Image: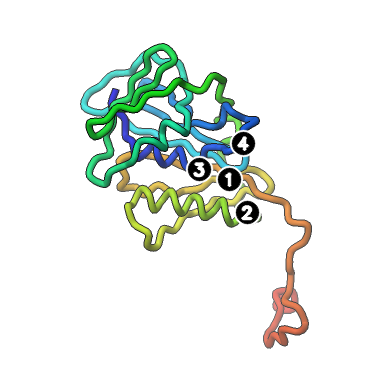
Amino acid sequence: MQINLKALKVAALFVSSDETRYYLKGVCVESRPDGFVFTATNGHYLTMCRHDYLDGQVMQSWAPFIIPISLIERVKLSRHCDVADLDLNGDAISINYMGATYTENRVDGSFPDARRVVPASVSGEVAQFNPAYIALFGKAKALIKGSKGENLITIAHNGGSPALVDFVPPDADFQGFGVLMPYRAAECLTAPPAWANVIGTSVAQAA
């Protein structure tokens, strides 16, 4: 089956590095009636990417399986081609790309039901996020665009609940979104410190 390798590579950016959660050290692949879905998470952030079946292919009767991150990293994405062949034979996963074949066994584990943490809607209540995680979504957008320029993302805030991240451009060859967990800051500045000698009216005074 042909897949969009760039979509798989984007999802792979969000794979966990926690050795104790080995079932998160890969990308979960779902073969659905309308195409492939790739999901990866580390518990703090999550991404899901999907694309239609390519060149008139039809759904494979594959149960969801996990491609190990070690296999995905071995396949180096070329800017000249985004399409690779994916094959599953028992526990062996093979990716054929640019004339080379890479094979490893699937991750022996069950991927969690990621959709349980995806919010159906967001409240808009402002939240705080780990800047390293935000930067990771920017890195993913740069990979999609093939550019290291201005790769802005949009976060739909959701208070203390998971937020939605829009980082896949509408002109990409696949679709996707992210989920980002907020962190609870012990305290936040509500006004600049006195030593800043700020001139102006505070929000509270203006109200």
Earlier in the chain: of badge 3 and badge 2, it is 2
Residue drawn at (55%, 42%), measured in percent from left and top? 179
The three-letter amino acid code for the residue at tag 3 is Gly
Whether residue 2 is visible, yes or no, is yes
The three-letter amino acid code for the residue at tag 2 is Phe
Asked if the residues shown at circle 3 and circle 4 are in contact, with their CB atoms under 8 angstroms apart, the answer is: no
Residue 9 is left or right of residue 47, and the answer is left
Numbered circle sitting on residue 129: 2
- Residue 126: give x, y in percent of width and height: 64, 56
Give the labeled residue for mark 1: 180
Measure the alpha-carbon separation of dots 3 and 1. 7 Å
Asked if the residues shown at circle 3 and circle 1 are in contact, with their CB atoms under 8 angstroms apart, the answer is: yes
| Mark 4 secondary-structure assignment | loop
Give the labeled residue for mark 3: 178
Residue drawn at (34%, 47%), measured in percent from left and top? 170
Q: How is the image coloured?
A: rainbow
Give the labeled residue for mark 4: 18
Image quadrant of residue 42?
top right
